[in-house]
Image (cartoon, rainbow, N blue to C red):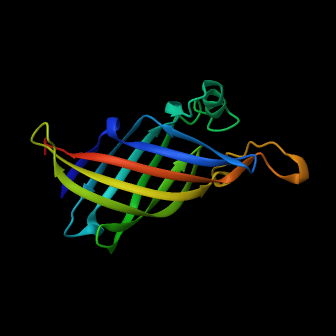
Amino acid sequence: MARWIVDPDHSVVAFSIGHMMIAHVRGQFNKISGTIYYDPLNINTSSVELVIDVASIFTGIGKRDDHLRSPDFFDAAKYPMISFKSTRIDPVNGTLVQVTGDLRMHGKTSQISVPALLSGPVKDPFGDGLSMGFVASFVINRDDYDITWNQLMAENAFMISSDVEIIIDLEADLDSTE
């Protein structure tokens, strides 16, 4: 089975969350690492592990990023990493797979199941390596991970939604050391 290493320079974990019931705040984590074991002939034996550095959160607004790193939200000092480890990968249709695994964030672990689209492999135009792409989009409830800070607004509405859309866009390179 081939081992693929997540390319941190061409990979991102992005998010979008409702703000004041009228708009969305978007951001991303800029430090992600991971390993994917992939067998196109036997998808069920494939696996993925990802690690996200919480302190690398970036929304473009320094004050907001600092607040998100604080104990009100991610508490990056206490919980510096978000991790995902697959427990099962099932083929769906063509290059679409269903990835099930354990998402650990803010000291809590929940099993999630998300669709992922695979692309490639393609030959690197600047070398002899091969690269693949993996894209997943799904929604989690931040309350499930005890990330519950909020502000009450008029008419008993909350400033920040509980649902968070996550978009994972990975590029991984074939490990040439194996």
Residue at the location (21% across, 51% down)? Answer: 3
Q: Is residue 169 above or below residue 54?
A: below
Q: Is residue 40 above or below residue 149?
A: below
For residue 94, side relative to residue 127 (left or right): right
Position in image of residue 147 (x %, y %): 67, 45
Position in image of residue 91 (x %, y %): 32, 72
Position in image of residue 141 (x %, y %): 63, 56
Extreme residue in the top direction: 62
In this view of the protein, which residue sits in the foreground, 104 or 61? 61
Q: Is residue 24 above or below residue 140?
A: above
In this view of the protein, which residue sits in the foreground, 138 or 112? 138
Residue at the location (89% across, 48% down)? Answer: 154
For residue 156, side relative to residue 4 (left or right): right
Question: Which of the 4 image quarters holds residue 47?
Answer: bottom left
Extreme residue in the right direction: 155
In this view of the protein, which residue sits in the foreground, 87 or 94? 94
Q: Is residue 76 above or below residue 114?
A: above
For residue 157, side relative to residue 164 (left or right): right
Position in image of residue 26 (x %, y %): 57, 42
Residue at the location (33% across, 35% down)? Answer: 9
Extreme residue in the front direction: 22
Q: How many marks?
A: 0
Q: Quadrant of the N terminus?
A: bottom left
Extreme residue in the bottom direction: 93
Question: Which of the 4 image quarters holds residue 106?
Answer: top right
Residue at the location (68% across, 47% down)? Answer: 23
